[in-house]
Image (cartoon, coloured by chain):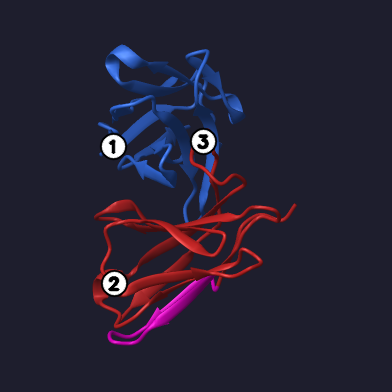
Amino acid sequence: AQSVTQPDIHITVSEGASLELRCNYSYGATPYLFWYVQSPGQGLQLLLKYFSGDTLVQGIKGFEAEFKRSQSSFNLRKPSVHWSDAAEYFCAVGTNAGNMLTFGGGTRLMVKP
Amino acid sequence: KAGVTQTPRYLIKTRGQQVTLSCSPISGHRSVSWYQQTPGQGLQFLFEYFSETQRNKGNFPGRFSGRQFSNSRSEMNVSTLELGDSALYLCASSPLGQGAQNIQYFGAGTRLSVL
C-alpha cells in the first residue's frame, strides 16, 4: 500500500522569502504525485502534478516541485512567498488502480508580513 | 464549465440519524470519488464510482455507502451517525475512467456536524 509523509505540520515564513515544503512517499511502482492547496473552509485546488518525464514540474501561482526517485521525495518550492499563499498544503500519491488518492497529513503555511 | 458542486454546504445532525450528501461532477466527468477530512485522521478515501458502479472502496464501515446516477451525479449516505463522523466530506470528479495520469477536481465540501 502507498503512503505519504509530510514531516512539517506547520511552517512560518516571511513574505518575500523562499519556501520549500517536504513530501516523502512510499509506493512500489511509478507514482503519480500531486500537490493540492486548501484555504480555510474550502475544497482542494490542484497546484501541480507529476506523471512522468521531466522531474521538475511547474504549477500555478509560481509553484514548482521536483521529483527525486532516489529519495522518494516530491518537494514543493516557491522562490518568493506572498501573504495570499497562507493555507494548508497537501501532497498526494495516485495509482493505476483507480481514482483514489492517498494524502499526506498536510503542512499549514503561515506568512509573516 | 461549472466546477464540482456539493450540497448542502453545512449540515447538523444528531447521533443515530442518517444523512445524505450530494455531489454534481464537472460536466462530462464520469468518475466521482469521496473523501472524509478530519483533524485527527486527515484526508481519507471513502469510495469511487464510475459508470454507476463502485469501483474502489476505502477502509470505512458499512454505515458509509454511496451511489451514482446515470447523469454521473453521486450521493453518499451515512447511517446511524456517530460523533466521530463529524467531518468535512469532499467530492472529486475525474474525466477519465482509469487512475493513470488522471486528475481529480474537488468540490468545496459538505461540513457535517454530529451532536
Which mark is on residue B87?
A: none
Report helix, strand or loop for mark 2. Answer: loop
The residue that disc 1 covers is: A2
Which is closer to the viewer, label 1 or label 3?
1
Looking at marks 1 and 3 on the same chain, the residue that comes earlier in the sequence is marked by 1
Amino acid tagged 1? Gln
**In this view of the protein, which residue sits in the foreground, B99 or B41?**
B99
Between the residue at mark 1 and the residue at mark 3, the CA separation in whole angstroms equals: 28 Å
Q: Secondary structure at mark 1?
A: loop
A40 is within the stretch colored magenta = no
Residues at marks 1 and 3 on the same chain: yes
Residue occupied by mark 2: B62
Tell me if mark 3 has few (under 14), some (14-19) or many (20+) residues whose alpha carbon lies within 10 angstroms of its own. Answer: some
* Residue A33: percent from left, percent from top: 43, 30
Query: Amino acid under label 3?
Result: Asp
Which numbered mark, 3 or 2, is in the foreground of this view?
2
- Give residue A87's position: percent from left, percent from top: 45, 42
Q: Which residue is mark 3?
A: A85
Residue A88 picture location, percent across and down = 42, 42
Front one among B55 and B84: B55
Q: Quadrant of residue B114?
A: bottom left
**Above-or-below relation of A11 to B70:** above
**Residue A67 in the image: x percent, y percent?**
41, 18
The part of the chain drawn in magenta is B8-22
Chain blue in the figure, letter: A
Q: Is residue B96 visible?
A: yes
Identify by letter the chain in red.
Answer: B
